[in-house]
Amino acid sequence: MDFDLSKSVAVLERTPAVLRTLLAGLPEDWTHRHVGPDTWSPFDVVGHLIDGEETDWMTRARIILAQGDDRRFEPFDRFRHLRTNPGKSLDSLLDRFAELRARNLEELRALNLTPDQFRLTGEHPAFGAVTLAQLLATWVVHDLGHLAQVARVMAKQYREAAGPWEAYLPVLHR
Amino acid sequence: MDFDLSKSVAVLERTPAVLRTLLAGLPEDWTHRHVGPDTWSPFDVVGHLIDGEETDWMTRARIILAQGDDRRFEPFDRFRHLRTNPGKSLDSLLDRFAELRARNLEELRALNLTPDQFRLTGEHPAFGAVTLAQLLATWVVHDLGHLAQVARVMAKQYREAAGPWEAYLPVLHR
C-alpha cells in the first residue's frame, strides 16, 4: 500500500488507547517483566514510545519541512527511557504517551501537507536521504512493531505454563 | 510465571476491547489485507478467535472437568472462519467475539475452580495428556500471539512505504 496521510493517522491516533486497553490495571507480572537481558518489558516499550514522541518523529518532520542547509537528523537514543522512567507508574507513562501523541498529531494535521511536501527529504545518520512520507510510514510501522513486541513479551511469560502446546504457538519462538 | 487463573482472566477479558480499539473503523487496507498466500488478514484473525470461543477453549475445559472415559479433544478446525465469514462486517465479528468471550469467562468464573482441578487432564489429539492449567495458559498465549500477528500483518502493508527504514524494523522481517 502506498503512503497515505489519513490512513497513517488512523493508526497513529489509536495506539495510545490500544496500549491502555491492553495494559492498564494488569498485574505487574504482565507489564514489568522482560524476557532476558537487553529485552524490554511492556513498561519499557511505552517509555520508548514516549521518547519517540519527544525527540524523534515530529522533530525530524520539522527538519525536513524547514529544508535548511543541515537536514541531518540527530541519532535517536533508544535507551533514554531506561534512565528517565524508573520509579514512574505505568499509568503515568500511558497518560504521557497519549498526551504527547495527541499533541503531535494535532501539529501534523495543522500543517495541511501537500503531496510535494511528502517528497521532501532529510538526511538519516545511517542511510542518507529519506522522504517525509517514509518517515511518517515508519512512525506507523514502529508503533505496530512495538505493539507486536508487547504482546510477544507478555505471551512468553506463559511459555512454561502452556506445557506441550508451546510447539503450536509460534509467538513463543520469535 | 506459574499459571494463575485471575492473571489469565485479566488478559483474556481485555482482548476483545483491544482488538476493537485497534481495528474498528480503520480503512480496509489495514483490516482486510493479508501478506501472501495462506496468511490471514486482521479480519481473518478475529474470525479465528471466534472459532476458538465457539469450539475450542471452553469445550475442551468441559471435557477435562467431566473426567469421562473419553477425554480426547476434537481437532480444532483452524480454517472454519474462512468458510463462515465472507461477506460479514468486521464490526459484526468484533461484536460476536466480545459477546462469546464474555459468556465463556462468565462460565469459567462460575466454575470456582480449585487447584486440584487445574491438574486434571484431557487428551490432545497430537501430544497426549494436557492439564486444565496448560489449556487455560494456552488460551492466553493464543490471544497474545494473534494480537502480535494482527499488528505484524498491518505493519507489513507499509513495508515499501517505509523505504530504507525497513532495515531497522524487525517486525517487517518476521
Image: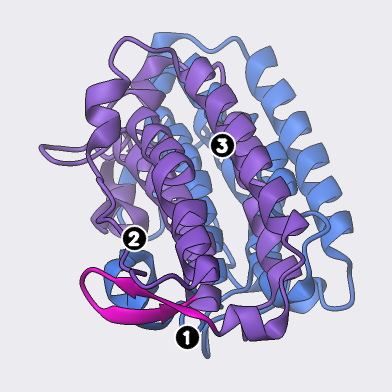
Chain colours: A blue, B purple
Foreground mark, 3 or 1, reads 1
Alpha carbon distance from label 3 to label 2: 22 Å
The image quadrant where one finds the C terminus of chain B is bottom left
| Both marks 3 and 1 on one chain | no
The image quadrant where one finds the N terminus of chain B is bottom right
Q: Looking at numbered disc 3 in the image, what kind of residue is underneath it?
A: Leu
Q: Is residue A96 left or right of residue A82?
A: right
Q: Residue at x 58, y 74 (%)?
A: A40
Q: Looking at numbered disc 2 in the image, what kind of residue is underneath it?
A: Pro
Q: Looking at numbered disc 1 in the image, what kind of residue is underneath it?
A: Glu
Foreground mark, 3 or 2, reads 3
Residue at the disc numbered 3: B19
Per the image, label 3 sits on a secondary structure element best described as helix
Q: Which chain is disc 3 placed on?
A: B
Per the image, label 2 sits on a secondary structure element best described as helix
Q: Start and end of the magenta stretch?
A: B120-131
- On whether residue B125 falls in the magenta region, the answer is yes
Q: How many marks?
A: 3
Q: Kindly indicate the quadrant of the structure image that contains residue A85.
A: bottom right
Residue at the disc numbered 2: B170
Residue at the disc numbered 1: A160
Q: Residue at x 66, y 57 (%)?
A: B11
From the viewer's side, name the closer residue of A69 and B29: B29
